[in-house]
């Protein structure tokens, strides 16, 4: 029963993380609106669309994470009571897959994208492209921070699952 509590805590933490995705999405959109209303220079105007796209992506991801984890949270108890061993095994497999994805995407691909965007800022003179690359860097930094925290939570949750599985196997 402790593992059910751990699963619920993990899912509730993921809901909070999803709210941060939504918050950053709103910030990017608000910044775009600010550049649209107050921007006088070509550089300021160039940030309107990249910021809007990044904000919409973050908003969409946050809403998707929120509703999927909300559904998962409500299903945990039913799945656990149906077959606790199968629940733990499926959660371990899902956690391992997610941790692997974080290791590959969040901690390898995102830094490479940041490095490429930073290099391209130096070599491109057009304001729109510089705005795009700067927005990409900001977007990737937000993803790195949020995914880094999610990865840490997932590792703790995975350890709890493995501990419970070994306890049940004895």
Image (spheres, grey):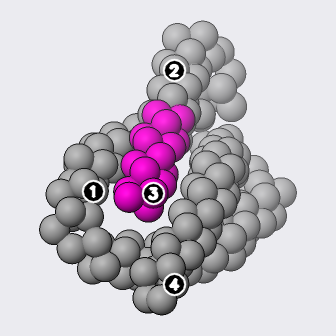
Q: Identify the residue under disc 3.
A: 2
What residue did someone put label 2 on?
A: 30
Upstream in the sequence, badge 3 or badge 2? 3
Say which residue appears at 68% left-offset and 76% top-offset: 108
The 10 Å Cα crowd at callout 4, few under 14, some 14 to 19, many 20 or more, is few
Magenta residues, dominant SS class: helix
Residue closer to the observer: 60 or 158: 158
Pick whichever of labels 1 and 3 is earlier in the sequence.
3
Tell which tag, 4 or 1, sits nearer the viewer. Answer: 4
Q: Magenta span has 132? A: no
Q: Which residues are magenta?
A: 1-21
CA gap, disc 4 and disc 1? 20 Å
Residue situated in front as seen by the camera: 49 or 150: 150
x then y, percent, for residue 154? 56, 63
Residue 9: image x %, image y %? 47, 46
Residue 18 falls inside the magenta stretch: yes
Direction from residue 146 to residue 91 in the image, left or right: left
The residue lying at 56 percent from left, 15 percent from top is 34
Q: Residue at x 51, y 20 (%)?
A: 30
Residue visible at 43% across and 81% down in the picture: 168
Marks 4, 2: nearer the viewer: 4
Q: Position of residue 134 (x, y in %)?
A: 70, 46
Q: Residue furthest top?
A: 38
Res 18 seen here: no
Which is closer to the viewer, label 1 or label 3? 3
């Amino acid at each position: 029963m402790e593992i059910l509590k751990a699963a619920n805590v993990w899912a509730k933490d993921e809901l909070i993380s999803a709210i941060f995705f939504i918050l950053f999405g709103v910030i990017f959109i608000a910044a775009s609106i600010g550049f649209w209303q107050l921007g006088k220079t070509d550089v300021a105007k160039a940030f309107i669309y990249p910021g809007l796209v990044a904000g919409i992506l973050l908003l969409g991801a946050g809403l998707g994470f929120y509703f999927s984890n909300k559904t998962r949270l409500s299903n945990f108890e039913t799945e656990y009571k149906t077959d606790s061993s199968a629940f733990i095994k499926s959660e371990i497999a899902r956690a391992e897959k997610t941790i692997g994805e974080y290791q590959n995407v969040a901690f390898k691909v995102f830094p490479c994208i940041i490095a490429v965007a930073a290099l391209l800022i130096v070599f491109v003179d057009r304001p729109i492209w510089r705005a795009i690359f700067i927005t990409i860097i900001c977007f990737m930094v937000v993803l790195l921070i949020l995914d880094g925290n999610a990865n840490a939570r997932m590792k703790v949750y995975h350890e709890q699952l493995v501990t419970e599985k070994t306890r049940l196997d004895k």
